[in-house]
Structures are given as structure tokens and as C-alpha cells.
Amino acid sequence: MHDANDSRHPISNRLLSVLPPAEFAFIKPHLNEITYQPGAMLARSGDTLRTCFFPNNGMVSLLCVTEQGRSVEAGFTGFEGMIGVSVILGKNEIPYDALVQANTNGFGVDAKVVLDLFNQGGVFHDATLRFAYVILKQMSQTCVCNHFHTIESRLCRWLTIMCERSNNRHLKLTQEFLAHMLGVQRTSIGMIANSIQRTGAIRYARGRVEILDLDRIRASACDCYRIVRDEQEKFLADENFAPMSDIRQTIVQS
């Protein structure tokens, strides 16, 4: 970790890149650049929220965990949002496990600073509330997905998202890991992955999945993929915010 004022990396995070100069100047001294590797656990459910994380890229899964230790992915975020949105909702406790799924670079910011900026009532206030809605929409859609859709269509949805977010078609994924993400039995993952492999869409070996035909995998994904994607794209294109290409900030040495 190092202070972001000493770097020249562009800010691709949606919530930070839309900030007008005054709001960006407020948060800029508090941006600490961080890079996480796949498998890093940013927070556990029930942890006190001391630092919020704003990804520039990659993917972080939001996992609901039972008292018995079983888990299922309820949502995810990347460059469009933040980990720690509960702080703006009046809770300094994180309600899920936050697990990094792909190489992820971003900025950590003290939760109190985030709340202070939110309480100014400016663009950051509006953007984070809009993002909170996106997460609620995503989580409610996941409930529908887990109950009504087949494991195969859910697996194809997850593989599509992971491939797009990591920008990588060679994925290191064990049966046990995928079973945790989807909240199903490990044996089910093996049978379904082998079935998909027979179609020529993937190459599946122990601990590895290679996407050979992303279009076919995407077409086999349940409609929750499209619904969540469309909601995220509406957020990214919200006309209340300036286009990202016009306002993307670059941290320069002060």
C-alpha cells in the first residue's frame, strides 16, 4: 500500500471519477492505492467498517455466510462501486464477506472520510445512493436466480461475469470454490461442468476452466445476467453524472 498522491494511475472507479473538483480535492489526500490478488478477503461479515475500498478494476464477490459456514454469492462489484456502502446507510458494520475474485487495483479510504464526503450532499452523495440501489437490485435478483434457475444457467452466468471482469478466459476455479459461490453441492458442479465441456464451450480440468466459446456461455446464462448488466449500465450512463471519458481524473504528484 502507498499513498495515491505519489502515483500517476488513472482513476477508473465510477464513484470517484464523477466527482467535481471540490469534492475530489476533499477526498484526494485520503486515497491510498492498494492492489489485491485473487483470494484476498477484504472483510468478514460483522466486521467493523474502518476502510472503504473503491476498485478501479477486477471483481469482488459479496458472500452471505451461514452460521454453519456455508456460503453463496449474493452480489459483486468492481469499478462501478465500492466495498463499504453500508457506512452511508448509517451502519459501520459490513453485512457480508467481501472476497477478491480477480486481480484488483483500487483505493482505500477511511470510512469516516467517506461519510463526511457523503454528508456534504453533493455528487458523491447522489452517486453512492444510486450505487446502493444497484446492489439492492442485484441481491434481490440473485434471490430469484438461486430459487428458480438451473445450476447450469447460473454457472454460465457466473463464468460470463468472471471472464468479463477479469478480462481472462483462463480461470483458476475449483469445484469446491464454484460450489461455494453458487451455494450448491460440489458434485453438482463437476457433472454440469463436464456437460458444458461436451458442447465445446469450455475446457475443464482439475482447478481450471478455459472459456473456449464465450458467446455460447453467455447465451446459456440465465436472464439475471442481462437484468443485472442492464441495471449497472444504466447507472454508468446516468445523465445526472458527467460521462466518464470527460471527467476521468488522474492523480498527479502534488
Image (tube, rainbow, N blue to C red):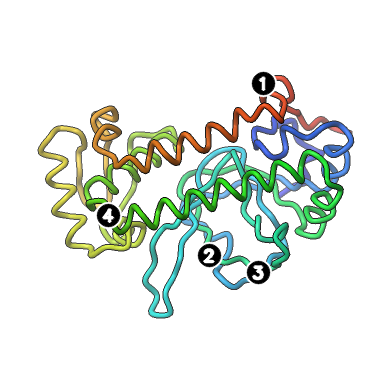
Measuring 45% from the left and 54% from the top, which residue is drawn there? 140
Q: Which mark is residue 93?
A: 3
Give x and y (percent) for residue 7. Answer: 75, 35
Left/right of residue 96 with respect to residue 47 in the rendered view? left
| Distance in Å between CA atoms under marks 3 and 4 | 31 Å
Label 2 – label 4 distance at C-alpha: 23 Å
What is the distance, in whole Å, between disc 2 and disc 3 at their CAs? 9 Å
Find out whether the residues at labels 1 and 4 contact each other: C-beta distance under 8 Å: no
As drawn, the residue found furthest toward the top would be 246
Q: Earlier in the sequence, mark 3 or mark 4?
A: 3
Q: How far across and how far down the image is residue 165, in percent?
A: 46, 37
The residue drawn where x is 76% and y is 42% is: 124
Q: Which mark is residue 245?
A: 1
Q: Quadrant of the C terminus?
A: top right
C-alpha span from label 2 to label 1: 32 Å
**Amino acid type for the residue under numbered disc 4:** Phe
The Cα atoms of the two marked residues, 1 and 3, are separated by 34 Å
Q: What element does badge 1 sit on?
A: helix
Above or below: residue 183 compared with residue 222: below
Q: Which type of secondary structure does the marked residue at label 4 adopt?
A: helix
Give the residue at the far bottom of this rendering: 67
Counting other residues with Cα less than 10 Å from the Cα at mark 3, is it few (<14), some (14-19), or many (20 or more)? some
Q: Which amino acid, by three-letter code, is at mark 3?
A: Glu
Residue at x 39% of width, y 36% of height: 226
| Neighbours of disc 1 within 10 Å: few (<14), some (14-19), many (20+) | few
* Residue with the mark numbered 2: 96
User: Looking at the picture, which amino acid does disc 1 mark?
Assistant: Ser
| Sequence-earlier tag: 2 or 4 | 2
Left or right of 147 in this view: 69: right
Between the residue at mark 1 and the residue at mark 4, the CA separation in whole angstroms equals: 39 Å
Which residue is the site of mark 4? 148
